[in-house]
Amino acid sequence: MNILVINAGSSSLKYQLLNPETQQVLAKGLCERIGIDGRFTYKPEGKTAVKEAEVAMPTHNEAIKAVLDALVDPANGVIGSMKEIDAVGHRVVHGGEKFAKSVLITDEVMSAIEECNPLAPLHNPANIIGIKACQALMPGTPMVAVFDTAFHQTMPSEAYMYALPYEYYEKDKVRRYGFHGTSHKYVAQRAAAMLDKPIEELKLISCHLGNGSSIAAVDGGKSVDTSMGFTPLAGLPMGTRCGDIDAGILQYLMNKYDMDIDQMLNVLNKKSGVEGLSLVGSDFRDLEKAAENGDQKAELARKKFSYEVRKYVGAYAAAMGGVDAVIFTAGVGENDHGIRELVCEGLGYMGLELDKAANNVRGKETVISTPDSKVKVLLIPTNEELMIAIDTAALAK
Ligand code: ADP
């Protein structure tokens, strides 16, 4: 079964054609600068050719058309015809409280996704455009929506409610939703496989540390708490996002510097996090280099980030009444052994001992705790496309 996975943004579109049963990726690539001049990248797996071209893409329709043309191209294509695409899985950022699972897309589902637009105004409308473009070009092919928020819909109310007047929840849907759900779900399932235990018996803490970062407490395979909130600004400090701060700071700074709320949020989303703190940048490789060269702010940014991750590990162990394994995933979690070491420092009291030699690894499934460590530490590369393809195949069958 071949599944086309589409992750559509406002001016870009990532795609991958894969077989969820064999986990074989047939081709993948990226359409960028949609609505501007259009740049197209196509990489068929197992072939050396990488096509990079300027393709006119006034809208997402032309972008999807370029993807389909490349996939069936006689020279560099990977399938004989579009009929060999059995279903399309679409990443959708926000499913609100409506979607606790992936769903087959119908007209009703499209309306329900549109109703979630105010909750993710930058993302959901782009996801919808991607779905409509595919529907226009591939009528009759089953389409599935896989939501970033769905996995976290199992959180109990004490975890998802904010202590605000209740009407803001009832009338305005203000609550914690959480994101990165597809990634947290995937690595939790892989952790169970690595530990050779049923997921129902495991208490896991999943640390998705990338440009955007979030942590999830996964008890018995269900998300019971997560660090991102109503928006992806909450929780950990990130590349350029501040994470949790005292809301009173907004009033103080807005008054002092005569900023409106949009200017303030621009600072919190784009000028804060480890970049704001270090003045070096948002990429952890740059921070590491600068810290090695004695840059104290870069060192502070790495320590602050790791400290907050460690606090969440403690908090979620408390929330679940224990923890069997801590998982590191995403760009920083998979690659930055120094950050993993800083996070795990001093967690011996809870039975967690990192194996420093085993930790000197990147990007492959590895147990990085000592053989005696009661709490296992796992490095698991995330694979959101595979998770989307698995859900899509199951629903399309
Ligand atoms: P996102 O999907 O949120 O954009 P990723 O999960 O791809 O982000 O993570 C990207 C980040 O991973 C980069 O900004 C960088 O900080 C970090 N990263 C990638 N490779 C390395 C590496 N070798 N060492 C340290 N950090 C890395």
Image (cartoon, rainbow, N blue to C red):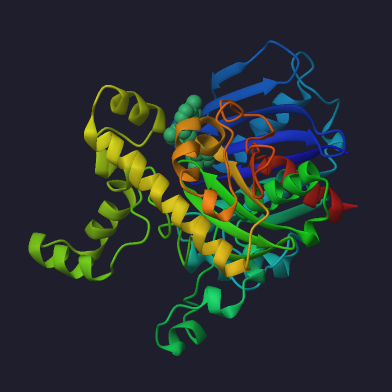
- Residue 190 appears at what percent x and percent y? 74, 44
Left/right placement of residue 241 relative to residue 62 reads: left
Q: To which quarter of the image does residue 295 belong?
A: top left
> Who is closer to the viewer here, 126 or 397?
397
Drawn side of residue 238 relative to residue 86, left or right = left
- Where in the figure is residue 50, as x and y percent of width and height? 63, 15
- Count of numbered labels shown in the rendering: 0
Residue 12 seen in render: no
Residue drawn where x is 28% and y is 67% of the image: 246
Report the residue that reaches farthest toward the top. 48
Residue at 25%, 52% (x, y): give it. Answer: 267
Q: Is residue 334 above or below residue 128?
A: above
Residue 83 or residue 216, whichever sits in front: 216
Dividing the picture into quadrants, the one containing residue 18 is: top right
Look at 77% across and 49% down and name the residue there: 192
Residue 72 at least partly seen: yes
Q: Locate residue 156 relative to residue 169 in the image: left or right.
A: right
On screen, residue 201 above or below 281: below
Q: Position of residue 383 (x, y in %)?
A: 67, 39
Up the image or down, 327 lies above or below 316; here it is: above
